Image (tube, grey):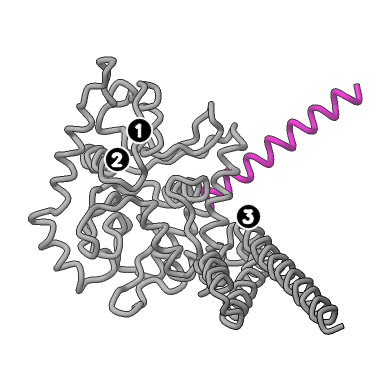
Amino acid sequence: MRKAIAAVVLIGATLLMQQTALAGAEEDRLAFVKYYKTRFPDIPFAEYANGIYAIDSDARGQWLEIEEFPPYEFAIEKGQERWETVFANGKTLADCFPQALQEIRVSYPRLDERLGEVVTLEMAINQCRAANQQPPLTYGDDEIIDITAFLAFQGRGKKLDVRVPENDPRALDAYESGKRFYYTKRGQLNLACADCHVTSVGQLVRADRLSASLGHTTHFPVYRSKFGGMISLHKRFAGCVRDVRAKPFALQSTEFRNLEYFLSYMGNGLDVNGPGARK
Amino acid sequence: MRVFVNLMLMATVLVAQSGCSTGLERRFAEVERMRVMAAEAGAEWLQTEELIKQAKTEATRGDMERSNSLLELAQFQAETAIKQAQHEADAWSGRVVQ
């Protein structure tokens, strides 16, 4: 009898902890949204999908001009070709994704129940290739970025709806790990992501304004004029880590995937509008 | 007698050199160990690994002063990164937007 009571108490405590952590994630998101609303009361929530151009009115004009002849169009076209490329076994990437084409982008990042870890769109593409006896694409290379550009374009207008499954403590761990990464100071400059994108949001770093983290994941991959090419979200993460003079993690590392999971959850409810164009 | 003294002198120099080399290797290994510790904590700084590499190159070239100075810098970076990670283990949660 005692054992039964102890088991019930243990199960109850575990469920309570999971509920609390889950409530924590949603509380985090609401606090995040509220922070930016207080900081920039005139900016509507939906505008944050436009990244820095939501808060930098000077740069916004230039961006809108660039968007008239989008520099990422070639990436979308190439991405479509690559998406439709038939493997030796007669299948294509589309065969691995049961969702409608428009839903694929917003289906990631998510927790893979079998692996017990966060899977991003890039990772899912390589999982698909492996399942079809194809060599993996190199993360950060044009080939995989083009495919994500095509899928992001197809998913435009769909809303981010990242789930942290309440019955899976691995999802909560991944979310917490991403959150911890975001708020942890690192590198020679001793800065956390939050130091720039929460505390100092809108301030100038040399000639550039610091963007809000709300909506950070909506518009990737992006064409960066600075590099004259497309970059992935994780490449941007690596750039930020390097900027604070810390050693960056590998693209698609657990650290960056969990960070993407956390940041995407923060952006829930915003439109996906990638690919984008940035300075 | 002079031959004997010379032999003793040479032997002393060889032993001293071998000791120095071992001491230097130990020092490199220690700094590398700290760098790895910082990396495992997810807190490695950008230049530490490169500084160790440069210090090794300078030691190979025989510029021990430059090698030492680079190694000291690498050690400082690795130690500070570890302290940073230890501090951040708790401090990060105080920054969460409420």
Marks 3/1: CA–CA distance: 29 Å
Query: Which residue, given by chain and number where applicable, does mark 2 sit on?
Result: A144
Give the prevailing secondary structure in the magenta stretch: helix
In the image, which residues are magenta?
A: A1-27
In the rendered structure, which amino acid carries the disc numbered 3?
Glu
Q: In the image, what residue type sits under mark 2?
A: Ile
Q: Which chain carries label 3?
A: B
Q: Which residue is drawn at 41% across and 29% down?
A: A127
| Residue A157 seen by the camera | no
Residue A77 visible here: yes
Would you name the residue on which mark 1 appears?
A: A125
Q: Could you tell me if the residues under marks 3 and 1 are in contact, i.e. CB atoms within 8 Å?
A: no
Label 2, residues with CA under 10 Å away: few <14, some 14-19, many ≥20: many
Neighbor class of circle 1 (other Cα within 10 Å; few <14, some 14-19, many 20+) is: many
Q: Return the residue nearer the eye: B34 or B28.
A: B28
Give the SS element for disc 1: helix
On-image quarter of the N terminus of chain A: top right
Whole-percent x, y for residue B30 in the image? 70, 65
CA separation, marks 2 and 3? 29 Å
A210 left or right, relative to A273 = right
